[in-house]
Image: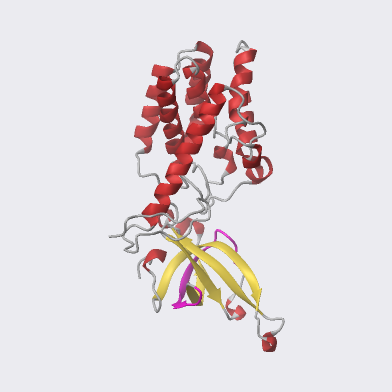
Amino acid sequence: MGKQFVKDLKNGSYVQSPFVVVDVREISFSSPAKSGEYFLKLLLGDISGTIKGIIWDRSLVREPIRVNDVLLVTGEVNEYYGLQLVISSYHKVEKEKVNRSYFQASSSRNTGEMWNRLKEILRQDVTEKNLSRLLEIFCEDYELVEKFKLSPAAKVIHHNYLGGLLEHTLEVVEICRHICTYYPQQVDKSLLITAAVFHDMGKIEEYDLNSITFDQTDQGRLLGHISIGLDILRKMLDKLPLFPGDLKMKLEHMIISHHGEKDWGSPEVPQTFNAYSLFHADLLSARLKQFQQVVDKYQGNTSGWTEWDRFLERRIYTGGS
């Protein structure tokens, strides 16, 4: 039997297909007659979505089930506060035999074309010699660039797929270019575009590319992408001993303030025109992609509305049929 995707499962569907484990929990039975006994509640997923998975019989579990395991599951879908897959048997799929295209979405845009477009903009618009040299050092670092081109921009919220970081970065750069046309006297174009390139660079180390569900690395959990990105930037700047101190300070401020608010994870709020511009360019790219991804999920839904989205805090009107 071929791959069955979550989006196609319905009440009564017989299932024999691989799914990745997104979450796993032990839950105690509510019945007093089964006090002290547990069943397993899983969240199973693929590129099309997630579904609850239930293992009532613990004797089926011969070894621990962990997040990121890929299970070849046999079972049946029923309805209980939404669809759930009741698992009658399963076995783990060896990582080297996993078809990652079932579980990891990729950018719809061509990675090579996006990278070439980004380099074209940098050659054309970054005219300040120190910033230009800094970007050359970045572009010449093959290992770093390959991670940059492959990484997601997030685990869940936006651009959460292979190539998502490059796509998001290019969007932010393009938005920044438009800002420069409206505020040419207030914005330093070379500085703004350079900061746009580096603003999320820490995400190349924040997410584990070997993880099917883009789990955070220990470094990502403990330090976060802003701190990691600042460290990556400073290591490049160390190769430019004559880089102006004032320019370095302005660039670093833009990196650490690009989330806009301390409550949103920024060590500092934007306090320059350039930093404030970067914050809004980043936010616009992220929010519009969130909106698009929610709408796309409900494509073809005749009700005219999506379900409530907890990140955007709203339902979205799609117009129905």
- How far from the left and from the top, in percent, is residue 203? 56, 39
In the image, 180 versus 191, the foreground residue is 180
In the image, 184 versus 140, the foreground residue is 184
Residue 98 lies, with reference to residue 229, above or below; the image says below
Instruction: Examine the structure image and report whether residue 73 is included in the region drawn in magenta.
Output: yes
Horizontal side, residue 240 vs residue 297: left or right: right
Q: How many marks on residues? A: 0
Q: Is residue 22 at all visible to an observer of this figure?
A: yes
- Name the quadrant containing residue 258: top right
Colour scheme in use: secondary structure
- Name the quadrant containing residue 239: top right
Residue at position x 40%, y 25% from top?
178
Residue at position x 44%, y 25% from top?
179
Q: Residue furthest right?
A: 36
Quadrant housing the C terminus: bottom left
Horizontal side, residue 56 vs residue 318: left or right: right
Residue at position x 60%, y 63% from top?
66
- How far from the left and from the top, in percent, is residue 98? 45, 58
Instruction: Examine the structure image and report whether residue 295 is included in the region drawn in magenta.
Output: no
Q: Residue furthest bottom?
A: 33
Residue 180 lies, with reference to residue 71, above or below; the image says above
- How far from the left and from the top, in percent, is residue 51? 48, 67
Give the magenta range: 65-81
Residue at position x 53%, y 65% from top?
43
Q: Residue furthest left?
A: 321
Q: Is residue 162 at all visible to an observer of this figure?
A: no
